[in-house]
Amino acid sequence: MPDKRANGGQVLVLNCGSSSLKFALIDPRNGNASLSGLGDSLGHSAPSVSWKIDGEKHSAALPEGAKHTEVIEFVVTNILSGGGILRADIAAIGHRVVHGGEKFSHSVLINEQVISAIQDCVALAPLHNPAHLQGIEAATKAFPGLPQVAVFDTAFHQTMPRQAYIYALPYELYEEHGIRRYGMHGTSHRFVSERAADLLGKAKADVNIISAHLGNGASIAAIQAGKSVDTSMGLTPLEGLVMGTRCGDVDPGLLLHLGVRLDYCMKEINDLLNKKSGLLGISQLSNDCRALEQAAAEGHQGAQLALEIFCYRLAKYIASYHGVLSHVDALVFTGGIGENSAYIRENVLNRLIGLGYRVDETRNLEMRFGAEGAIEPPSGTTSTPKVLVIPTNEEWVIARDAAQIIASGNSAASGQPAGGS
Ligand code: AMP
């Protein structure tokens, strides 16, 4: 068993969902995870925890009714001590928090004021923020005195200008209820855009990037000189691209039509748009891109149509972000689909030939399953925009932010909610 103390200063990264808790012990210097795992079915029947430590997989049942607190207790008493990891090896806890509203434009050290600000944002993320608060409370009990840092999905997009985030609705809805576009996946867009600048050999302030995070949830961001200036998700993660089960952009008149003409209630509309639409809804088969690619190749027309619409809508967003940015240094693909689907990338790029995009088939096939690099033809043949595949690593960003905040003791990052955008 390797001596974990040799890696002192690790960060325990927690990502609490409504019925799940992902955890990982990350070395902030290089992103290596000595431990990663998932508590699943929390608050439901047959809750369980599975984890991987030093490459070995394990799993265990949790008591009926177990929630986030029980997972964290299990991590402390069974996994960490069983794996020879001491509390002293953990320098901080980093929490992924979905919604920080306009209160947070950076990661912050968690204190009472921050907890109450996360609470204030519950209306904007009713499924996620309460789960994050439970995770913070459980971690405070399990690790008394250990610094905890909150890293917000929305923070990176707080640099968007008003023209990008204000809806064309009565302005008082923004002023009184915070109804505006916030964007999500900010931690991923930030990570891959910074990595893209590294790969281009430039400072992040010197590059403009279009970042496409394509997973079961999907969003795209226009990043100018290291700052998000537009993104496809809005008040909620429903806006924008076609996703696994979410519809993305629709005519808002659809909601009236469903409610008034077709007699749908609010819950049915919510389920329809969030859980039954997207790739699943169109294909009537699956939300899983890999399964749809297979079915489409075998002639399934619903799968073919779903993938066609997914690529068409994504290509339209990419083209529109060329209008947002003065120039584009690179287009980046990330997320489960972006990192692995050569088919989707080729299909999208072939729709953007008018903007100069080209794809190199061999490179495109090579850049899968964790590989990182360019997929446009080698330079010299044509002057095409750079297209990069970059595996995202949100846990590493969370660990880095946590380590940086506790090392600096910086007041701007020490629990003062930021002043908005
Ligand atoms: P994520 O939410 O980032 O984990 O991404 C999940 C999505 O990535 C699912 O739609 C998967 O089908 C898709 N995905 C993962 N691997 C592949 C692959 N090799 N080819 C196509 N899609 C993939």
Image (cartoon, helix red, strand yellow):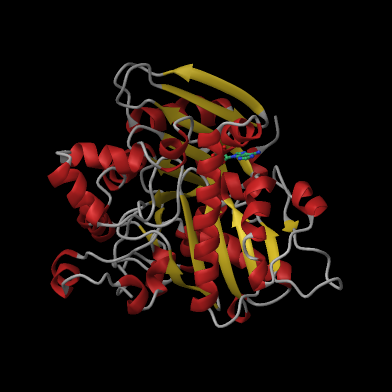
Residue sitting at x 29%, y 21%: 65
> What number of labels is visible?
0
- Give the position of the N terminus as an image quadrant: top right
Q: Position of residue 419 (x, y in %)?
A: 30, 75
Q: Quadrant of residue 200?
A: bottom right
State left or right for residue 95 relative to residue 384. left
Q: Quadrant of residue 118?
A: bottom left
Residue sitting at x 28%, y 72%: 166
Q: Is residue 247 above or below residue 203?
A: above
Q: Is residue 127 above or below residue 397?
A: above
Q: Quadrant of residue 34?
A: top right
Q: Position of residue 147 (x, y in %)?
A: 41, 53
Q: Is residue 405 above or below residue 137?
A: below
Residue sitting at x 48%, y 42%: 216
As rendered, which of 276 and 34 lies closer to the eye?
276
State left or right for residue 76 relative to residue 350. left
Q: Is residue 291 above or below residue 150?
A: above
Q: Position of residue 227 (x, y in %)?
A: 49, 74
- Give the position of the C terminus as an image quadrant: bottom left
Q: Residue furthest right?
A: 380
Q: Position of residue 209 (x, y in %)?
A: 59, 70
- Ligand 1 is found in which quarter of the picture? top right
Q: Is residue 403 visible?
A: no
As rendered, which of 101 and 341 lies closer to the eye?
341
Q: Is residue 48 visible?
A: yes
As rendered, which of 212 and 347 lies closer to the eye?
347
Residue sitting at x 71%, y 45%: 368
State left or right for residue 163 relative to residue 75. left
